[in-house]
Amino acid sequence: MLPTFTYVRPKTVAEALEQGAAEGAALHAGGTDLLGCLRDRVFQAGKIVSLSGLSELRGIAATREGGLRIGALTTLAEIAEHATIQERYPALAQGAASAASPQLRSQGTLGGNLCQRPRCWYFRGDFHCLRKGGGRCYAVAGQNQFHCILGGMGCYIVHPSDTAPALIALGAQVRIVSRGSSRLLALESFFVPPAQTVRRENVLRPGELVSEVRLPPAPAGMRSRYRKVRARGSWDFALAGVAVAAVLAEGKVQQVRVVLSGVAPIPWRATEAEAALVGKPLDADAIGRAAAASVAGAQPLSHNGYKIHLVRGIVAETLEALV
Amino acid sequence: MTRRRGSKGDGKGLSRRDFLGSVGASTVGAALTVAAPPLTAAEPAPQQEGLTPVALRINGRAERVLVEPRWTLLDVLRERLGLTGTKDGCERGECGACTVLIDGTARYACLVLAVEAEGREITTVEGLMNGEALGPVQAAFVEADGFQCGFCTPGQVMAAEGLLRKQPHPSLEEIREGMSGNLCRCGSYRHIFEAVRRAAEARG
Amino acid sequence: MRYYVDGEDRPATEPQGTPQLPPWGETRVVGKPLSRVDGYERVSGTAMYTLDVALPDMLHAAIVRCPHAHARVTKVDTSRAEKMPGVRAVLTGTTPGADLPWYFGEQGPTSKLFDPHCRYAGEEVAAVAAETPHQARDAAQAVVVEYEVLPFVVDPDAALKPDAPKVHEGGNRLGDPRVTQRGDVQAGFAQADMVVEGSYRTPCELHTTMETFVSVTRWEGDRLTVWESTQGVYATREGLARTLGLPLSSVRVICPYMGGGFGSKFEVGKYTVIAALLARMTARPVKAALSREESFLSEGNRPANLITLRAGAKKDGTLTALQGSFTGVVGAYPSGGTAAFQVLALYRCPNVRVEESDLYLNAGKARAFRAPGFPQCNWALEQLMDDLAQKLGMDPVDLRLKNLTTVLQMWGNPPFTSTGLGECLTRGAEAFGWQAARARPRGAGPVVRGVGMAAGMWGYPGEPRSTVIVKLYPDFSVNLNMGASDIGTGTKTVMAMVVAEELGVPLARIQIEHADTGTTQYAPVSGGSQTVLVNAPAVRAAAADVKGQLLEIAAGEMNCSAGDLVLADGKVARADSTGEPKPVTDLRGLQERQVLVGVGRRHPHPQGKVGLPFAAQFAEVEVNRRTGEIRVIRLVAAHDSGRVMNLKTYENQVFGGMTMGIGFGLTEQRLLDPQTGKMANANWHDYKIPTAKDVPLEQTCVPVDPHDTECNTTGAKGLGEPATIPTAAAIANAVYHATGVRVTEAPITPMSMLELLAVPKGGE
């Protein structure tokens, strides 16, 4: 059952920012994660600020530069089914299509998918963990098969989004609006690792919201894919996933980004893997080295060592599929 | 028992406390004695405070209900409007038993706040009937034996309806994908896929 | 025969003898793939499940549960909760009438309704009743409970150690191991040319029925009416009457539709008694509905099993010895945890020894779950047999065929009334294309394919106790009145088809009353794969009784004896075809009486024989060795469950059982946090049951009907449980065939697959 809250549905973004700045306010986009968090008492929210009246946050349109602008309230289903996204930014379409279930994709929004809270069952469960202001992380000595192998520090969550790795691989930017101003930043910079703080997963402050995501024009010859491995065929978050975007020319990799999901508290750029590919032909040798490099520095916990094999496997498989 | 429509009692009305008081405190067996008198409510009329009026359109009918903001569309359908065809399986969007159509798209009613559902066209399993006759998707489920205990079935039927409105001629693989947001613990999946295939044929 | 329910064994007391009706020959209705008689209600949303019941003036209950794996309640403060909006009653262990014994072991009750000594996280501590479900939950959260937290144990290996925290005073083992043996296993192993052994583990599994657990209770004076999501209204009635000290005549349990049981709903739950007590206190009906998360904690599970098995055989595959030890992790209170039955009975073997014991743990107590103990045993036995076949250089199907038996090798060695296991193996293999599939290359790349199979059987012949009434109305339509629940297996449809078969009345002219202790007659729980084999003969007998009475009346009006007459197409005619057939509706005697009431009772089991079902299932899997993903490509199930009563519902049942087997083998496990003992995956995303995308599109059912005329007067045997017994082992054997890795611990997840694949294999 949900706890009691008041509900407002502002008619303008400015009003939404005002309402959202109040103590105990939470933004309601699609609501698929918010309601779950409230049910599990992950945090308190005395006031729900609905964004559903803000039509300017919807829609997919071309940008002047020839890229794409996706409103934060665009649903995952709309993204997965969008012809231009499927054609030019397939990793994003695949990421969106691989999330959750059909009904959830029709409700969950891009903004919500980027801002969703972690799925760690200690975080969601009746445990007063570090991320909720408590004194310890229960995953370290507990059931950590779904926790991170990279980037953990004090807290070992994985970031649950499938769209974020794809967007980062595709060079996306995110616009954050606050009262009186807005700023555009690389999506990579949106996420906050535990090394910085364990109390937030992204840079958003109360009184701010994500209004849109912008994709640069897809370079000629760019190929991209998102591959997700999960325990079940539907609903499940990734055991690990990888988004790859590469431009090949003259048989060699000109540019490439390899971004992992399900392995780190933030979408994880596998920069060593990228370095092993740039300037090389996409052959078995380079792919093998990239796959090995993608888990460089990985530090598994007691039950998630399999992720090291898994990441190597999906990186290899996905790079092969790009050829 | 007949299908219920309309608001159910809000806890007022005939109180049976008076009846039992006059009958006396009869002891039935050693294990059971009449307990202390029921607690009296110290608060004012419980239902009127903190309630928001909301105008919903359900199966083509306008319904005006007073809701707490925290009540989901599922709560309202089942508890306020007596439309118990839509089932409650988990209240977390993890099973699909509460699937309804919102503006023709299959959605989980348990994850939609009633206040968010204003102004939308909501269709429940009751809304797929043709009077007392089954609609084509429902009939296909019966023919294909697409259920066992039947509790997930209204949700499956609604998911199938939503799928077929978007994709009138899905392949078996597309059917499986489209129905992947609905659990069936009895494991009728194979027959469910067949039911959707037949429904697609029946709809033409 | 022994069958455990809620920790109690039920000994065999049923009398044996011969039934009276001759076996059916060719049937006109029974066996056909007919649509369900209540399909309309289920797909229209008009079927009223207990969760849908809304009575005027009804209150809602919410339960306060212990958050600790092991603790003593030192204080319960309900003062804040009592003042909250809509609260009408609060119930604790000290409320008069609430001090009720619970969880019975061999020495009597081991706990109470609200036991201040809580032995698992989720155990009931108190309850409230309020006007709305939200108000009830809010108030439950406002009850303040103080606990003295105690050391706990949630790891089975830890629980076995002598210094482990004790769940109960007597230690963590439930008494001494139960030993069953025959012959001389030492000698048997000495005779063997090949000996194989293995250790296996299966997880704790949860039923997760679509409709959780829910009761609506209403008193009228001293009489209690309960709507309950149950598999057996008579079992619920009996349990409630006993607990509340009421005569059976004062308790009425009703359940026309229920959303899944799988064994979790045979018995009275605490929430039902809590609702009844709250209803008594408030003098209003009370509904207690468990949330999904709650349903994972307190309403039973399939216990984890730790099994070691050893098999010895001759070069030609003949088994000479089988030995095993089974530990069932039953949780916090007594329950049955294991079933070594298949080791003793599935294959012919003169020398067998099994030891079974149960282990306590600070976790929710086990409960019957679709073939209790059998999938766990099958997981071990059928992988061991697969291993044996490989080491002998034999085809796995041939190894099973080599060791068939026609006799139950215990309980006085009664012969089976029929056994189609051999035919299941050969016809299943043929339908699957087994030989060709075994010979196919697995694949040289990262993605490999393999095929595997497993045999199985179920060990409960049913409680032969059911009384059914069939009433004939003057317009030749019929009322079928029976106590049995239809838990989704199609019981109502099958029983109506039996009436249709006997009387020639179309299904559309049969009215069914069922599953209401106030208006029907005793039937055992719909579970244990006994519903058809117990009730169909009783239905047949009742319909035959009606027919007999009808023919007697007709004989009087047609001037002959009843033995000269037959009933067909709604008319009574002379068997020798002389004279005019007389429409039943023209019989004066029927019109005068306005109803004929036929009573049928289930006849006893056959003397000195036993009817049990058998199965063989075949699986093809694809394994991605780079990612650990396992996909089930196709499944074939060959089942000897006797006569197919309705081909549509039969197939659905088989596919459903296999789906559950996929869960057991590949996706499901309850995970407990080692630091607190609490369940870590207590929601329906994290406790993973198979979705539509986890089952193969290609599923085939091959019914094998041995035309058993001895098991009962309909020739049907059980199906619900055999359908799920061998699936997981067949999949595991297929995974082995594909990868060369034998996965002895269920479930086989991408996580475990990757870890096992990463282990370098010696000598390859």
Image (cartoon, coloured by chain):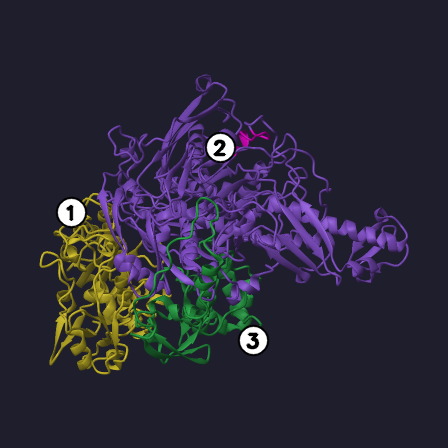
Judging by the rendered image, the residue that carries numbered circle 3 is B131
- Given the image, what chain letter belongs to the residue carrying mark 3? B
Disc 1 packing (10 Å; few <14; some 14–19; many ≥20) = some
Q: Taking C107 as reference, is A170 left or right?
A: left
Quadrant of the frame with the N terminus of chain A: bottom left
Return the x and y of residue A243 as percentages of the image width and height: 24, 61
Residue displayed at 61% across by 44% down: C533
Q: What is the magenta range? A: C398-408
Q: Chain of mark 1?
A: A
Tell me the colour chain B is drawn in: green
Q: Amino acid at mark 2?
A: Phe
Question: Residue at 42% across / 39% down in the picture?
Answer: C733
Mark 2 sits on what residue? C341
The label shown at residue A299 is 1
Q: Label 2: state its secondary structure.
A: helix
Which numbered disc, 2 or 1, marks the residue closer to the eye? 2
In the rendered image, the vertical position of residue A178 relative to residue C90, given as above or below: below
Query: Mark 1 belongs to which amino acid?
Result: Gln
Residue C529: x, y in percent?
54, 44
